[in-house]
Image: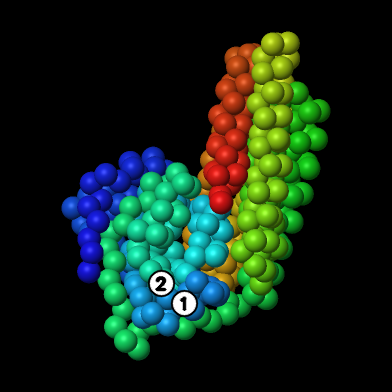
Amino acid sequence: MTIHDPANAMPIKPACSGSCDCSNAKSLKPRVEPGRVVAEDQVSAHGAAASSEVNGLWRRSVFRIPGMDCPAEEQMIRLRLADAPVTTLRFDLPGRTLIVDHGGEAAAILSRLLPLGYGAVLVESEALQQGEAPAAAGANDADEACVLWFLLAINAVMFVVELGAGLWARSAGLVADAMDMFADAAVYGVALYAVGRTARHKLGAARLAGMLQLLLALAALGETARRMLTGATPEPLGMVGIALLALAANVACLWLISRHRDGGVHMKASYIFSANDVIANLGVIAAGVLVGWIGSPWPDWIIGLVIGAVVLAGALRILRLR
């Protein structure tokens, strides 16, 4: 067994709820309890994995990934490892841990994860005993696609609604939140397209989504800058009303996830994903209230810049995939 010192791990994201004990730097063993493993998917190993199987080089490695706390980042990791010699991926998003059954050395898997910028650190890696080598098995693609279609539809509709309302209400916050909705829809769309397809198709779809997300993020930031230069004051009631509708849409996503918590789309993890969207919605609502209270557009501009920057960072992470 080889042990990697996690002392150089990147800081845990502020969004961490603390339930994963990730602040305990002395613990090398991640706590992945049976009830808390939020995603387990066995993927095709293709030619590289087959070669490793022949050579008997199967290993089971555990990675601590501080920046991984939602299905969007999980999908980026899956795409990154799509053509690696991997047979099984087990995600524990609340615990920020990933268990990988793979061929070859753990350092090769880590080298694929590092460019994503999530702060991946190897916790431990051990060789599998003879007979322990995992057999690839197909995921329940039909169930996964069904839930993804619902989530994609909700986010796509709200992208159109928020974008139109943001332009009408002259709200930079609503326009930026619409881009966040598009970012979510793009991730689900890539996941749908990727079901049953090759790694080349997956990466191609991810890059297309990343390019569209990048253009929309720049457009949102540019629109915010334009409104700051012209001094345009948003309509506070419109801001609050549409943001409440977006909040209701994300609550609907949570309800949908709760009804399929035992499905193949890693539902417990999606709670965290939707919670991030809820925070953005609440930020726009708070900005709308402040605009109406103090009579200044600055709260709207600030929330627009913050959300736009988050969407831009997500687009750049997608485009770094190779």
Decide: is 264 above or below 256: below
Give neighbour class at mark 1: few <14, some 14-19, many 20+ (Cα, 10 Å): some
Tag 1 secondary structure: helix
Q: Give the percent coordinates (x, y) of residue 261.
A: 54, 69
Q: Residue at x 58, y 80 (%)?
A: 138
Tag 2 secondary structure: strand
Q: Amino acid at mark 2?
A: Gly
Q: Residue at x 22, y 60 (%)?
A: 3
Q: Quadrant of residue 12?
A: top left
Q: Give the percent coordinates (x, y) of residue 70.
A: 50, 53
Q: Are marks 1 and 2 in contact (CB under 8 Å)?
A: yes
Mark 1 vs 2, N-terminal side: 1
Residue, disc 1: 51
Q: Nearer the viewer, residue 292 or 18?
A: 18
Mark 1 and mark 2: span between their CA atoms?
A: 8 Å
Image position of 74 (left or right of 110): right
Tell me, yes or no, if residue 313 can be seen here. Answer: yes
Q: Quadrant of residue 38?
A: bottom left
Q: Nearer the viewer, residue 120 or 238?
A: 120
Q: Amino acid at mark 1?
A: Ser
Give neighbour class at mark 2: few <14, some 14-19, many 20+ (Cα, 10 Å): many
Furthest residue to the bottom? 131
The N terminus appears in which quarter of the rendering?
bottom left
Q: Residue at x 56, y 51 (%)?
A: 322
| Eye-nearest disc, 1 or 2 | 1
Q: Give the percent coordinates (x, y) of residue 207.
A: 66, 49
Tell me, yes or no, if residue 270 can be seen here. Answer: no
Which dot marks residue 270?
none
Q: Quadrant of residue 32?
A: bottom left
Q: Residue at x 56, y 59 (%)?
A: 79
Residue, disc 2: 103
